Image: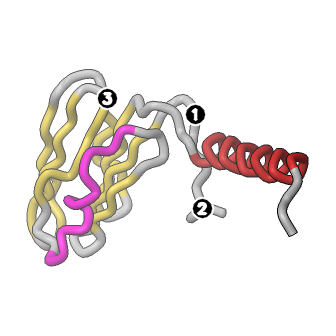
């Protein structure tokens, strides 16, 4: 049995609604500040307006964080698997890079907070 024109329209409309709601719920705005933590304590809160670099000490050694206008990243970390370095550049509010073995984290914040599934 073939779908009718109305069936196709309802399916396309539903798919569009799901896509729009997903983008709205998870799409944080552009980041404005970076919050850098070490051992659970806020070390720096920096605006994403100009290029800077920070070296944050952790139990395994120093983690190097680079900030450029509108984005930030963990450039180097002594952790064995380099997962936080592989996150790459973070630009959206709510994005984070966690260097768990070295207890250093980087979080982007903006005017509009993104939906956080971990906090749910």
Residue placed most toward the observer, 25 or 32: 25
Residue 84 inside the magenta-drawn segment? yes
Boundaries of the magenta span: 80-91
At x 11%, y 57%, the residue is 76
Residue 118, percent from left and from top: 56, 65
Task: Name the residue that disc number 2 marks.
Answer: 117
Task: Choose the circle earlier in sequence order: 1 or 2.
Answer: 1
Q: Is residue 18 above or below residue 30?
A: below
**Distance in Å between CA atoms under marks 1 and 2:** 16 Å
Identify the image quadrant of residue 103: bottom left
Main secondary-structure element of the magenta-colored stretch: loop
Residue 107, percent from left and from top: 38, 48
Label 3: how many Cα within 10 Å (few below 14, some 14–19, many 20+):
many
Quadrant assignment for the C terminus: bottom right
Q: Is residue 47 above or below residue 4?
A: above
Helix, strand or loop at label 3? It is loop
At x 10%, y 68%, the residue is 78
Residue 5, percent from left and from top: 86, 47
Residue at the far top in the pictured view: 49
Q: Which mark is residue 112?
A: 1
Q: Is residue 101 above or below residue 28?
A: below
Label 1: how many Cα within 10 Å (few below 14, some 14–19, many 20+):
some
Task: Name the residue that disc number 3 marks.
Answer: 70
């Amino acid at each position: 049995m073939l779908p009718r024109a109305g069936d196709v329209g309802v399916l396309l409309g539903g798919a569009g609604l799901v896509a729009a709601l997903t983008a709205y719920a998870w799409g944080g705005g552009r980041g404005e500040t970076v919050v850098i933590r070490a051992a659970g304590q806020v070390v720096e809160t920096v605006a994403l307006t100009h290029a800077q670099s920070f070296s944050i000490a952790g139990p395994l050694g120093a983690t190097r964080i680079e900030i450029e206008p509108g984005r930030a990243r963990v450039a180097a970390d002594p952790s064995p698997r380099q997962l936080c370095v592989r996150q790459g550049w973070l630009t959206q509010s709510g994005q984070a890079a966690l260097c768990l073995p070295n207890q250093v984290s980087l979080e982007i914040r903006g005017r509009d907070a993104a939906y956080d599934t971990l906090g749910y």
